[in-house]
Image: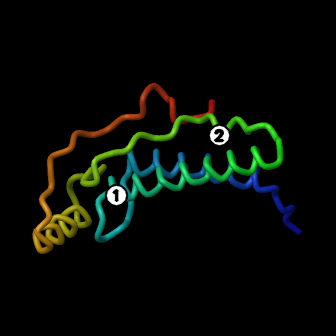
Amino acid sequence: MKKKLNPIEEYATQIVREIGRWNYILENGCNDPFWPDGTNMNLTRNHIISYKREIAEYCEATGTELPPEYYMPTPPEVDENYMAVKKGKRAEKIKQFEEFSGQTKKQIKKMQPEDGQLTLL
């Protein structure tokens, strides 16, 4: 039977997982057929912020210490139109969707994590 984690451990685990997801999308993109990678990266960033807020509230209410994961840098907000992979079927479909919906797409240069700051190690 799987051991149930306390809320702090659970949210700390989610922070590490979501930062990993953000970094993965940065490098490889994602599979969302309608939204650019930047939109998904910002959604993932919002999850991290939410988990950190939950940890802070729980620790304040219980008088416990903040875990190290809480201090991991929150990924930066990115342009909603950022695409990790600019060519391919998915990029073309999103471009067509944006043209159909009247949205405009800007040219966004490839982002890089800042000196490994998005990792705990």
Task: Identify the residue at image location x=43%, y=57%.
Answer: 43
Task: Identify the residue at image location x=27%, y=50%.
Answer: 82
In the image, residue 24 above or below residue 66: below
Label 1 to label 2, Cα distance in Å?
23 Å
Specify few, some or many for label 2: CA neighbours under 10 Å numbering under 14, 14-19, or 20 or more: many
Task: Identify the residue at image location x=57%, y=54%.
Answer: 50
Disc assigned to residue 98: none
Tell which of 76 and 30 is nearer to you: 76
Q: Is the image coloured rainbow, by chain, by secondary structure, or in one colour? A: rainbow
- Specify which label sits upstream in the sequence, 1 or 2: 1
Q: Which residue reaches farthest top?
A: 115
The residue wearing badge 1 is: 39
Q: The residue under label 2 is which amino acid type?
A: Tyr
Residue 10: percent from left, percent from top: 73, 55
Task: Identify the residue at image location x=64%, y=53%.
Answer: 14
Secondary structure at numbered mark 1: helix
Q: Is residue 26 left or right of residue 59?
A: left
Q: The residue under label 1 is which amino acid type?
A: Thr
Disc assigned to residue 70: 2
Specify few, some or many for label 1: CA neighbours under 10 Å numbering under 14, 14-19, or 20 or more: some
Residue 90: percent from left, percent from top: 26, 65
Q: Is residue 6 left or right of residue 10?
A: right
Q: Quadrant of the C terminus?
A: top right
Tell which of 74 and 94 is nearer to you: 74
Q: Is residue 77 left or right of residue 52?
A: left
Q: Quadrant of the N terminus?
A: bottom right
Residue 31: percent from left, percent from top: 37, 65
Residue 108: percent from left, percent from top: 20, 44
In the image, residue 118 above or below residue 22: above
Nearer mark to the viewer, of 1 and 2: 2
Secondary structure at numbered mark 2: helix
